[in-house]
Amino acid sequence: MSIQDDPVQREIHQDWANREYIEVITSSIKKIADFLNSFDMSCRSRLATLNEKLTALERRIEYIEARVSGFEGIHRKVLFT
């Protein structure tokens, strides 16, 4: 009597096949979740670094604008006095 003939053996075999399939799916979902969490952390870190650089550039621009405005004011005073 083969597995094909015995309904109980067939059910057991099918059950194991289903369990293996579910395990593969579960494992794949876990890998995807791990990747997404890692990607999220990487993106957040890079965005934080970029934000710091942009903030530093904005401060430098404000400083340069203030200096240029000051020089323009001094230049105007010299020209018109």
Image (cartoon, rainbow, N blue to C red):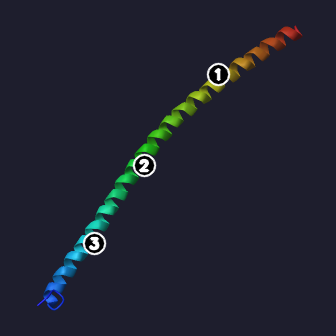
Quadrant of the image occupied by residue 18:
bottom left
Residue that appears at 38% across and 48% down = 38
Of callouts 1 and 2, the N-terminal one: 2
70 left or right, relative to 27: right
Mark 3 residue element:
helix
Q: Which residue is drawn at 83% across and 14% down?
A: 76
Q: Mark 3 points at which residue?
A: 21
x, y percentage for residue 2?
14, 88
What residue sits right under mark 2 in the picture? 40
Q: Position of residue 33 (x, y in %)?
A: 36, 57
Work out which residue is located at the far right of the displayed protein and give it.
Answer: 80
In the picture of the structure, the residue carrying the numbered disc 1 is 63
Callout 2: 10 Å neighbours few (<14), some, many (20+)?
few
Answer whether labels 2 and 3 touch (C-beta < 8 Å): no
Q: Earlier in the sequence, mark 1 or mark 3?
A: 3
Secondary structure of the residue carrying numbered label 1: helix
- Report whether 67 appears left or right of 10: right
Residue type (three-letter) at the residue carrying disc 1: Tyr
Image vertical order of residue 37 relative to residue 20, above or below: above
Compared across the picture, whether 71 is left or right of 17 comes to right
Q: In which quarter of the image is residue 79?
A: top right
- Say which residue appears at 20% left-offset and 79% top-offset: 15
